[in-house]
Image (cartoon, rainbow, N blue to C red):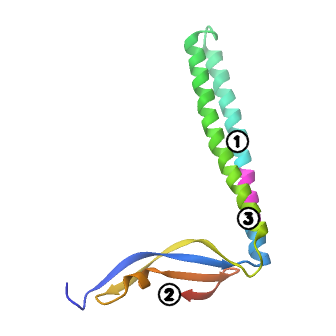
Amino acid sequence: MADGVVLSIKRSITVRAVVTPRWKEDAERELSQALVSLDQQLAQLEQEGQQLIDEIRRQSANPLDPRIQDQVASVQQQVAVKRAELEEQKRTVIEQQRQVRELDFEQVVEQGQIESFTDVRVGDNLVEKLQVAVLVRDGVIEAIEGA
């Protein structure tokens, strides 16, 4: 490649947030909404699973037929697997809530990743080009680190 060639590459940028009262309120509200959503999904799962089982039994001439019992057991197993997934998600959100409550004001936490593009040339330090972070306070950028 020629020395004058410029290559545009995608990179991940770490978003770091300063913990403020507003940040904590927003984070707790989002986590509470996630818990409500998970509870609704659990209730809907139970209801739909029971409706499906009732429908299988209703359509059968003999609800005690082993094939019908196998279908019911299969539905119950699928519901149990999905319930376990949702309950695990719920435990994770509850743990995140606990962690948010324990954060001190002015502490800096990783909030996520965003992607951007950057140009690189022969002679650039690729590691430095890829190690970029944005520091925000209540949504306002305070610093761009490593740009």
What residue span does the magenta drawing correspond to?
28-37
Name the residue beneath numbered marker 1: 42
Among numbered discs 2 and 3, the one appearing first in the sequence = 3
The N terminus lies in which quarter of the figure?
bottom left
Name the side, left or right, on which 132 lies relative to 41.
left
Name the side, left or right, on which 37 lies relative to 123.
right
Real-space CA distance between mark 2 and mark 3, rounded to the nearest whole angstrom? 28 Å
Give the x, y percent position of residue 5. Answer: 25, 87
Dot 1: within a 10 Å radius of its alpha carbon, few (fewer than 14), some, or many (20 or more) residues? some
Is 107 magenta? The answer is: no
Point out which mark residue 63 bears. Answer: none
Q: In what element is the residue under mark 3?
A: helix
Give the x, y percent position of residue 42. Answer: 70, 41
Real-space CA distance between mark 1 and mark 2, rounded to the nearest whole angstrom? 44 Å
Name the residue beneath numbered marker 3: 99
- Dominant secondary structure (helix, strand or loop) of the stretch shown in magenta: helix
Name the residue beneath numbered marker 2: 146
Question: Dividing the picture into quarters, in which one does residue 66 lie?
Answer: top right
Real-space CA distance between mark 1 and mark 3, rounded to the nearest whole angstrom? 24 Å
